[in-house]
Structures are given as structure tokens and as C-alpha cells.
Image (cartoon, rainbow, N blue to C red):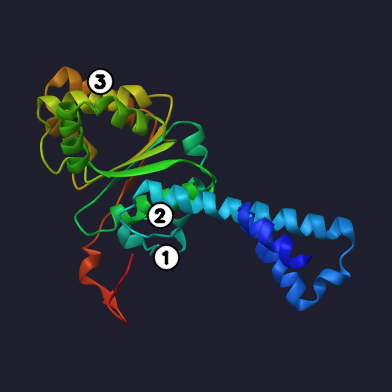
Amino acid sequence: MNEETLNKMRKMKFFGMHRAFKISLESGKAETYTPDEIIAHLVESEWDERQNRGVQQKIKNARFRYKAVLEDLHYSSDRNIEKNQIMRFTDCSFIDRNENILITGSTGIGKSYIASALGHHACSMGYKVVYYNVAKLFAKLKISKADGSYIREVAKVERQHLLILDDFGIQPFDTQSRAALMELIEDRHGKGALIITSQLPVSKWHDVIGEQTIADAILDRIIHNAHRLELKGESLRKKRVGNDELIT
């Protein structure tokens, strides 16, 4: 009878219940539970299983650059990173308030890692996140214009609670990319949060975007409710420890 129950749990994809019930049977603990206790135990196990699967799916969908966690961040005064400031972001209230985080600093300083770590954490809190390298995103949008999938691609971005734009300003925006950026920012303004990383200080973004009127409109929407992390110091890619693991 127990084997039949286990088979039915597996076929119905109650994998959390299946694992919990099987372990209880093998350990002999099933006999010590009252009926209401075993039901609560199985339901709790299934709940946890589905929550964990949901988080893993969100992380997979986000397509992060790094498998990053906040616990591995390296804090020091010479990097201009305050632990308290990062920890204030962990309740994800900046996402609820549709606020932005702008992370700037020289190449290799850890901007992308911090952005990815915040994104991973947001996924664990149940938020939908997507990560894009800016140059690759706008190249993809140009192709989608040609093959008719542009609206679908933009709609995918709009559905996310948090959009991460990495390596902003590596190259100047052309007319088509500038128009697409304006559309993305306009659609998200007041409706979703942004994390942007850039080697350039924010004061240089206007020149990279180009066309003054559009640049003014874009930056007004990005900057006015933004938290800023201005990283300093030398490239962390030059600093390695032990088994060649990158210090973040």
C-alpha cells in the first residue's frame, strides 16, 4: 500500500511529499506521527520543494553572468563598499518602490558580481529578474526588429520585477539602440526596478546616449530615484587566492 502511495505521489509530481514520505518510512518515523502530523509534514515538504523549484527556475530564467551570492562579497573601505548599504537592499524594498541602483567603477572592480548577487537574492525572495549585457541586448533587439519578434522580446523585459543592465556605455548608442533604450526605460518607469553597471561615471552617460533631448529624458527617469554605488580601487581580477578563485 505504501509503495502504491509513493508511486502515485511521483506520478502526480508531488516530489516533496514523495521524498518526505519515503524517508519517514525508511527511518520508521512514519509510525510515530499522528494523522494530522503526517499530513502537515507532507504538505510542508511539498511546499518547500515547490518554493525551491520556483527559485531555481527564476535563477535559470534570469541568465546571470555570475553565480553570485551576497555572502561572498568582499567589503573594504578602499573599495568604497559599505556592508550596511548592501544589506539595506536585501529586503528588496527598492524593487517594491520601483527604484534603481547604479553601480559604477573601473573594469574588474566587481560591479557585475554585485549586480548578479543582488539579482540572485531577489530571485530567492520570489521576484522575477532578468540580466542582460547592454551591447548584446540591443543587438538582439535589432535582430528582433527584422524577424518580427521585437514586441515579444520587449514584453518579456516588461514582465520582470528587476532588470539588470550590465556594462552600460561600453559603446555609444546609435539611433535605433537609443530609441529602444528610451522605450525600455519609459515602460519601466514607476513600474519596475533597474540595476545598471558601468565603467563610466554617471556624469558621462549623457554623452554615450547622445541626442540631448532623448538623453535628458532617459537619464531623468533613471537617476532621480537611484541609489549609487561608486566603486574604487584596482581590478579584482588581479587578486586571486588559493585555487585561483576570484575575490569578489
The amino acid type, in three-letter code, at marker 3 is Ala
Query: Please, what secondary structure does the residue beneath circle 2 have?
Result: helix
**2 or 3: tag closer to the N-terminus:** 2
The amino acid type, in three-letter code, at marker 1 is Asp
**2 or 1: tag closer to the N-terminus:** 1
* Quadrant of the drawing holding the C terminus: bottom left
Corner quadrant of residue 6: bottom right
Residue extending farthest bottom: 242
**Mark 2 to mark 1 CA distance (whole Å):** 9 Å
- Residue 75's place in the image compared with 205, above or below, is below
Q: Nearer the viewer, residue 20 or 199?
A: 20
* Quadrant of the drawing holding the N terminus: bottom right
Query: Please, what secondary structure does the residue beneath circle 3 have?
Result: helix
Q: Are marks 2 and 1 in contact (CB under 8 Å)?
A: yes
**Mark 1 to mark 3 CA distance (whole Å):** 37 Å
Which disc number belongs to residue 117? 2
User: Horizontal and vertical percent for residue 40?
Assistant: 79, 55
- Residue 159's place in the image compared with 199, above or below, is above
Q: Residue at x 29, y 53 (%)?
A: 112
Corner quadrant of residue 49: bottom right
Residue on which the image places disc 3:
217
Which disc number belongs to residue 63? none
User: Within 10 Å of the Cα at label 3, are there few (<14), some (14-19), or many (20+) other Cα atoms?
Assistant: few
Residue on which the image places disc 1:
72
